[in-house]
Image (cartoon, rainbow, N blue to C red):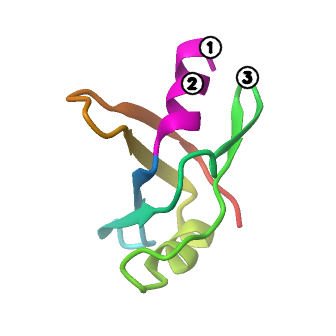
Amino acid sequence: MHPPDREWLAASPFHLVATADAARRCDVSPKGDPPGRTLVLDDTTIAVPDRPGNRRVDGFRNVPADPHVGLIHRVPGRGDTLRINGRARR
């Protein structure tokens, strides 16, 4: 995790979480809250608390079956995004 990535995560109030179930069916869930809720634990690990999104629990069901996830973080007023791919755990 580079310093600009850390700054981006600190400023981002919105992100999308993409997961897939055991049959490889994909789901994307929007999550939003005040900036600063995504914590950088070290250079390869972040912590994202569960927050209100589309009020579905697909990600909680999907992660145990397939831990691969994709995150896209947005910052208001910017046209670019920060994309993070990796493995999740509950």
Residue 18: x and y, percent? 38, 57
Q: Amino acid at mark 1?
A: Pro
- Lateral position of residue 42 relative to residue 88, left or right: right
Out of 73 and 34, give the one closest to the viewer: 34
Residue 14: x and y, percent? 41, 52
Seen in the picture, residue 2 relative to 19 is either above or below; the reply is: above
CB under 8 Å between discs 3 and 1: no
> Sequence order check: which comes first, mark 3 or mark 2?
2
User: Most extreme residue toward the right, as rendered?
Assistant: 41
Q: Secondary structure at mark 2?
A: helix
Read off the residue under disc 3.
Answer: 43
Residue visible at 43% across and 64% down in the picture: 31
Out of 53 and 18, give the one closest to the viewer: 53
Marks 3/1: CA distance?
A: 10 Å
Residue visible at 63% across and 52% down in the picture: 37
Q: Quadrant of residue 79?
A: top left
Marks 2/1: CA distance?
A: 6 Å
Residue 29: x and y, percent? 37, 67
User: Most extreme residue toward the top, as rendered?
Assistant: 3
Q: Nearer the viewer, mark 3 or mark 2?
A: 2
Read off the residue under disc 2.
Answer: 7
CB under 8 Å between discs 2 and 1: yes
Q: Which residues are magenta?
A: 1-12
Q: Secondary structure at mark 3?
A: loop
Read off the residue under disc 1.
Answer: 3
- Lateral position of residue 17 relative to residue 61, left or right: left
Seen in the picture, residue 41 relative to 14 is either above or below; the reply is: above
Disc 3 residue crowd, few under 14, some 14–19, many 20+, Cα 10 Å: few
